[in-house]
Image (cartoon, coloured by chain):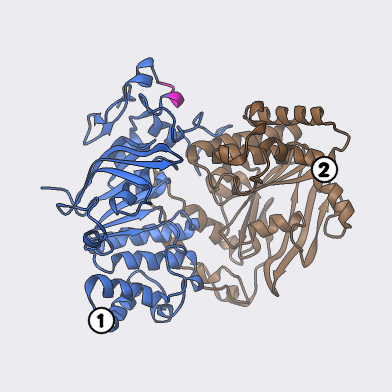
Amino acid sequence: MEPLLNIEDLSVDYTHGGMEIPAVRQVSLAVAARESVGIVGESGSGKTQVFMAAMGLLAANAAVRGRVRFEGGDILGVGAESLNRVRGSKLTMVFQDPMTSLTPHLTIGTQLAEVLVCHAGRSWREARNAARHMLDRVRVPEPERRMSQYPHELSGGLRQRVMIGMSLLCEPLLVIADEPTTALDVTVQAHIIDLLGTMRRELGMALVLISHDLGVVAGLTDRILVMYAGRIVESAGAAELFQQARHPYTAELLKCIPSLTGPRQQRMPTLLGQPPRPGDPDEGCAFAPRCARAAPRCRTVRPPLEDAGGSAHRVACHFPLPS
Amino acid sequence: MNDAVAVTDALLRVRDLRVEFGGRAVLREVSFDLFAGETLGLVGESGSGKSTLARAVLRLLRASRGSVAWRGRDLLACDSRTLRALRRDLQIVFQDPLASLDPRMTIGETIAEPLRIFELALDEPARAGRVAGMLERVGLAAAMAGRYPHEFSGGQCQRVGIARAMILSPALLICDEPVSSLDASIQGQIVNLLRDLQADNNTAMLFISHNLAVVRHLSHRILVMYSGRLVEMAPRDALFDRPIHPYTRALLAAVPSPWAPQPQPAATAVPASLPSATGCSYRERCRYAAAICAATEPPLEEVVPGHFAACHRARELMT
């Protein structure tokens, strides 16, 4: 059976000042119904670009190639009209900054209700009732009063609850959450993680969680994909990835996370060097210049994403760490 | 930090510092000492007053009450000429590395600017020499001096910001979320650099961050702020291993880790819109709140030697 979301061989290039700048390179991934997948990687790794491309949300100077299917139908390059049959209803997105992704001059109630009016053809009256019910469901206190408030009157945490509520109004099959807690305080973050987990269990939707924070992803996802320089370099079950990372980049990234408990090291572990910059030559493994295990072959031959043994563990490395 | 240092040796003594915006107190009666070579971590959520405290200490904004004694002189009371002279020793690194650099100046000009202001005797070649040395000290090539900020990555821009702050070898460096906008693999590079530079000059450091693990790594003592007040102050290990204040406990419990991925949202209720005017400002989120917490605001008290907390139930909670 075809997965709910199927991305095949997706590439994104930007044209800027006469230069072709690659952002995503031949990424293939699938998300099954009800599955929860984490996408991790540092800024510039392309993790957001993959899903912005899939949702048809990239700027005009982005060239997207590949194939994206949702519920068996192509959604890449089909035009806004057909895309909007799924986008915003069956396939929704929650963004990082809940302030800039809500409209400042419309009340919370109007913005939420509008989703149902536009996508589900409900009357405003029905839509407002459903919106109020949803605010209650995502545990926004005093939903009645919030309905008539504007985004700036709400705290960051409450705004993100509203965004999550909005993404759930049409009972989506897949919610893509892009750094949904990055702008929030850690205590508020814990509530939002808890809310996302609860809603997923209750509504049975699939979730893609994009984050640079491996801790956040660990708590919410079954499977994790690690991206580096526009490509997927490792893919594994969440627990397996944290116990037995096979790609040197993943392993180094995990080492860089300082701990709240246990012995403190004199120096913080670091990854030497910088990720490649857009426009750098795209040869061999992009991580090779920063990799302690790199051999000459790594600089010339790109390692494909291959089975690494274990349950659905895949890694793109000529010399993966032993399992 | 040497625990035997006498209190009078504090480089910086902040007492009862209060800041009001439009009649509303955003910083209330904050007091602490900072010693040479010491790193004081300052944690708390957004809006708790961390950056306000940093700016009030440097007199980048006006405090309405209190004192900030720098080597015995009150920065808040001195005239602007004296303040300007003293500021040579007081430097700050900001969160957004690119926004805090002037886009029209080369990074060499940016790093040289403090020298231009404070070391008037220096001629151009000598200044260029100092800038080149500093660039290399922060891990950038001296040849990069002629480039502009937009040519650098976030981590590199933060190195430039640090070079500008450290070129006069200040006695105090305030870092306001210096690694928050950087990727995990780059954070450690910057933290290690700050530590090395601190060791060069025995610099005192006030390190503001919402990243508790980074604060733990770097700090000797930690201050925890909530709603404009210090609610806990303790040596690093005491704070992380035996936190007292319910807010500190909730904060530590909320940090997710890949190896213990279940943060505990139950430890805190959803925050109320505004803290109430009387009593403890944390009480509406506090699972331990009692009647007394609504009646009076708990003072910051030394619960065990060196470990201060502002909680009516501190002693009970420790058992």
Drawing shade for chain B: brown
Residue at left offset 32%, top offset 58%: A197
Residue lying at the far front in this picture: please name it. A18
Residue A313 is inside the magenta segment: no
Image coords of residue B159 (percent x, y):
62, 37
Residue at left offset 81%, top offset 40%: B116
Q: Nearer the viewer, residue B297 or A60?
A: A60
Label 1 sits on residue: A123
Q: Is residue B201 above or below residue A261?
A: above
The reply, left or right, for residue B301 in relation to residue A249 is right
Dominant SS in magenta: loop
Label 2 sits on residue: B117
The quadrant the N terminus of chain B occupies is top right
| Colour blue maps to chain | A
Q: Is residue B256 above or below residue A141?
A: above
The reply, left or right, for residue B98 in relation to residue A54 is right
SS for dot 1: loop
Q: In this view, does B268 lie above or below B128?
A: below
> Mark 1 is on which residue type?
Ser
| Residue A246 in sight from this viewpoint | yes
Q: Which segment is the magenta one?
A: A289-293
Mark 1, Cα crowd under 10 Å, few <14 / some 14-19 / many 20+, is few
| Residue B36 in sight from this viewpoint | no
Residue at left offset 66%, top offset 43%: B220
